[in-house]
Amino acid sequence: NCTPGRAGPLCASCAQDYRASKKICVECKNVSTEKRLLIGLGCAMTLLILAAAAWKLRRHLPQPSPRTECLLQLIMAQLAVLLQLTQLWTVLGGLTPAVDRAKNSTDTANVAGDPLLGYLAALQFTSSEVQNFLALQCLYDGVTVRSMFAVATPLVPLLLLIACGCVEAFSRGLGIRVGLKMLTVLFIGGASGSAQLLGCQRTDGAGTPLGEFAFRPLFPHERCKEALWVDRIGWTTSICYGFFIPCFLGFLFAKQNLIMRKVKTVIAQAVRDQGQVVVRLQCVQGEEPFKDPVLAKRLAAATAAYVAVH
């Protein structure tokens, strides 16, 4: 017999009128379709009003000073790093309950996990978190919804990257900028979802091997030897997250380093002679001389820097 809210083989699935949330089954609240529609329309109208107000204020706010702009850029860069650290903490923290249960099967304190991790998991911005927030399992068939969004979690970031590649083909530089910002937000969640697709539950709560009854945690109705299409999607997306994307980032870093090498190995000199200022560029490592358009830009930048300082 399963506890209330559980159903299926080994009580691994959620029963009817229950939804899966953070490895536990939560009872669906009796909210009518009309109320859900009103809540959705209210949220959409609120977002539209906030967006319109922000756009209106942005047009009337004074132009920020260069110091303020530099400070805002520094804050945004630090927030991106903090977001990725939080996402990594959530992924690693989700592994802790499983380790604790393996060591001591009588300990039930870790079944639900740390409540704080449940809130921080929303910062991964995955498809599974979206359906969990909207409680779509209560509106439609829970098994179908969980399966669809489990597969969408690693696929959506990759499809968005492909879309950024198409944008890059028409607007050089724009697609890469958008893609890098998107990877900052979605990479860890997508990679975690890809690894979860390959997961297989081979023991029960007491640590007893399940043998041929081993099942997939994201698809409790499927055994590990069944639904091989899940493995294909999991391995394909894992290769993309573990090999192709890091290689692409490494290529961008090497290309940037190659382009910026001449800038880093050039010294600008300014000499005042009879009321005139002569600006020269000198290569430190004997690099080949700049072409005329590039040299003109570097000289203009060096002259602007001299005027700004002196």
Image (cartoon, rainbow, N blue to C red):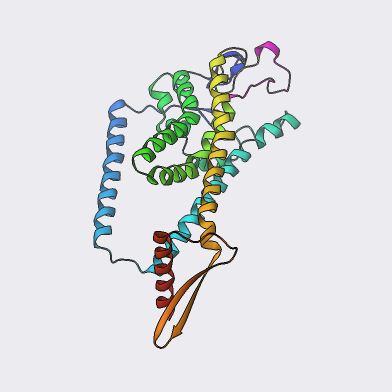
Up the image or down, 130 lies above or below 138; here it is below
The image quadrant of residue 240 is top right
Q: How many numbered tags mark residues here?
A: 0
- Magenta: predominant secondary structure element? loop
| Residue 196 in picture, x, y percent from top left | 58, 28
Q: Residue furthest bottom?
A: 274
| Residue 153 in picture, x, y percent from top left | 48, 30
Q: Nearer the viewer, residue 241 or 119?
A: 241
Residue 153 shows in this picture: yes
Residue drawn at (38%, 45%), measured in percent from left and top? 174
Up the image or down, 100 lies above or below 280; here it is above
Up the image or down, 30 lies above or below 179; here it is above
**On the picture, is 137 further left or further right than 201?**
left
Q: Magenta span covers which residues?
A: 198-213
The image quadrant of residue 265 is bottom right
Up the image or down, 231 lies above or below 242; here it is above
Q: Is residue 203 magenta?
A: yes
Residue 108 shows in this picture: no
Q: Residue furthest right?
A: 103
| Residue 99 in picture, x, y percent from top left | 70, 33
Residue drawn at (43%, 24%), measured in percent from left and top? 137
**On the picture, is 49 further left or further right than 130?**
left
Residue drawn at (39%, 34%), measured in percent from left and top? 163
* Image quarter hosting the C terminus: bottom left
Q: Is residue 115 magenta?
A: no
Q: Nearer the viewer, residue 305 or 39?
A: 305
Q: Nearer the viewer, residue 85 or 37?
A: 85
Q: Nearer the viewer, residue 232 or 104?
A: 232
| Residue 248 in picture, x, y percent from top left | 53, 40
